[in-house]
Image (cartoon, rainbow, N blue to C red):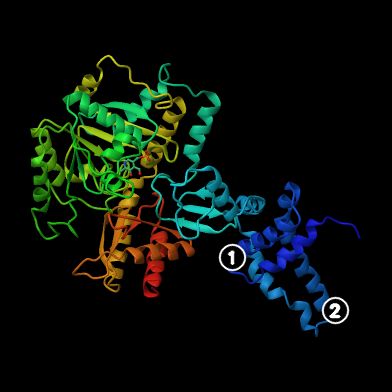
Amino acid sequence: MHSFAIADLAIATAYATLGKAEPLEAAVHVARGYQRVKALDEDELASLFGLVLLRLCASVCVAARQQKQRPDDPYLSISQQPIRETLPRLAALDPSRVEAALRAVRAPTPEETLSARRRVIGPNLSVAYRAPVKIVRGWMQYLYDGSGRRYLDAYNNVPHVGHSHPRVVRAGTDQMRLLNTNTRYLHDLLGQFGERLTATLPDPLRVCYFVNSGSEANELALRLARAHTGRRDVVVLDAAYHGNTSTLIDISPYKFNGPGGEGAAPWVHVLPLPDIYRGKYRRGDPRAGEKYAEFARQVRNPAAFIAESAPSVGGQIILPDRYLASVYAIVRAAGGVCIADEVQTAYGRMGTHFYAFEAQNVVPDIVVLGKPIGNGYPLGAVVTTREIAASFDNGMEFFSTFGGSTVSCAVGLAVLQVVQDERLQEHARQTGERLLERLRALQAVHPLMGDVRGSGLFLGVELVKDRSSLEPATEEAREIVNRLRDRAILLGTDGPFANVLKIRPPMPFSDDDGEHVASALDEVLAGL
Ligand SMILES: Cc1ncc(COP(=O)(O)O)c(C=O)c1O
């Protein structure tokens, strides 16, 4: 009999799925093994899954007929119970997910991808996790690898409204099909995006500039501050990171005090991180905020104070009450302007407020936005006052080729609209509150969990070997993150000792996802 060779693979694959916890993963393994020996073409891959289902259906029909004929032969029903369990699960899978997973068997393996990357990409780009993850598809708070395995993304804040959010994708692709030009031509989206964005900010933050990244935005913020004050010096928080340009490395202690760094330049003044868990003034001191702010008094003639309104790179720090108000007052009295780096904390992530600075009851002079505002499309923004914008307008044109482009404005508008329509800030507040409570319950059981802190979907778990010396449990943090990765949960670490587990997921992250993270963390900690 002559037939299609793919039928062989379909039959083998059909039986390999039976009784498996992840039947699609099993199917992908078999297909990948076959592909290594005999290349599969597009048509074969497109038909494989349907043929697998068909084979199982055929088996049920054939067995029914044979059992009628030979009711005493137990072999005839050997596959029937497993098929009864697995077939409905296979049939319920999202066909596009199946197709993506099967197509991926023709793609290079993660090992091949890694070696290609090592051949052509600069060596100091890092790869997360001991066993690198190769993601081929994203959907809201989930990521999928080539075998169809689903990972819970509890870490990435760039896909703020969710990976591949359809409204954002549509806004970007529709506009790209029509027109994508720069700000030297008139188009309505630029003004619309500016209006919508400034409407989320308090007075007098009314003037926008659009760029392509958080780094570009911080770089521009420094130029604005320097143009306005005629000064150069910058005041920063310890352990901060503000971006990858030369000037931003100079104002990022996380970099200039880290490996390969050259220490602080004379024009950079580093204030202690207002960390009430590990710093000089601790939780329980009602004036910790004011006391940390006092360090700013030592700085003469600053152009600017720049800080994340909730230091994320510093280890998911929630600033003590009145810290920013006090430090802003000191810096302004010394003639400097105050820049809020909201690259990680904007757009409702903190749950209680749309921007993290609002929780500190301050209004910055310049607000810097990045990561989430384009949901993965490269988009950064600087919003400032009319006075500062006027100082910057000194005759030199400001132009960014891609910044404020037609497509970026369309994407930016869509993201903002989704955040509001889907009430993501309130969702973050409620989900974060429940997860924080759950993590605090775990803290009572696991001594390694020294501190649990955060707001909304901006959470941190600081791991310590000893709750009195606070010796950082850096190795353990790395181990936990890797073991969670093996369980298909993606988290990261941060803080000066890399001992803070960072939970900062896409905003659609649900209560079930939170429970999944907490129970996995509980098990991993118990098994450590
Ligand atoms: C607080 C903060 N500011 C600025 C940046 C720089 O943004 P980008 O990488 O988009 O240039 C980052 C990036 O990690 C950041 O975390």
Q: Is mark 2 within 8 Å of ligand 1?
A: no
Location of residue 385 (image quadrant): top left
In which quadrant will I find the C terminus? bottom left
Residue 246 location (% of width, % of height): 32, 35
Q: Secondary structure at mark 1?
A: loop
Residue in the image at 32% along x and 33% along y:
217
Residue 220 location (% of width, % of height): 30, 29
Which-is-in-front pick, marks 2 and 1? 1
Q: Nearer the viewer, residue 255 or 309?
A: 255
- Amino acid type at circle 1 is Glu
Q: Would residue 395 appear left or right of 75 to someone viewing this image?
A: left
Location of residue 370 (image quadrant): top left
The quarter of the rendering in which ligand 1 is drawn is top left
Q: Is residue 271 visible?
A: yes
Location of residue 26 with respect to 454 vertically, above or below: below
Q: Rounded to the nearest whole Å, what is the CA distance between mark 2 and mark 1?
A: 34 Å
Q: Would residue 338 appear left or right of 398 to someone viewing this image?
A: left
Find disc 1 in the rendering and name its residue.
22
Q: Residues within 10 Å of mark 2 (few under 14, many from 20)?
A: few
The mark that comes first in sequence, 2 or 1, is: 1
Q: Is residue 385 visible?
A: no
Residue in the image at 77% along x and 68% along y:
59
Residue 220: mark in rendering: none
Residue 292 location (% of width, % of height): 12, 49
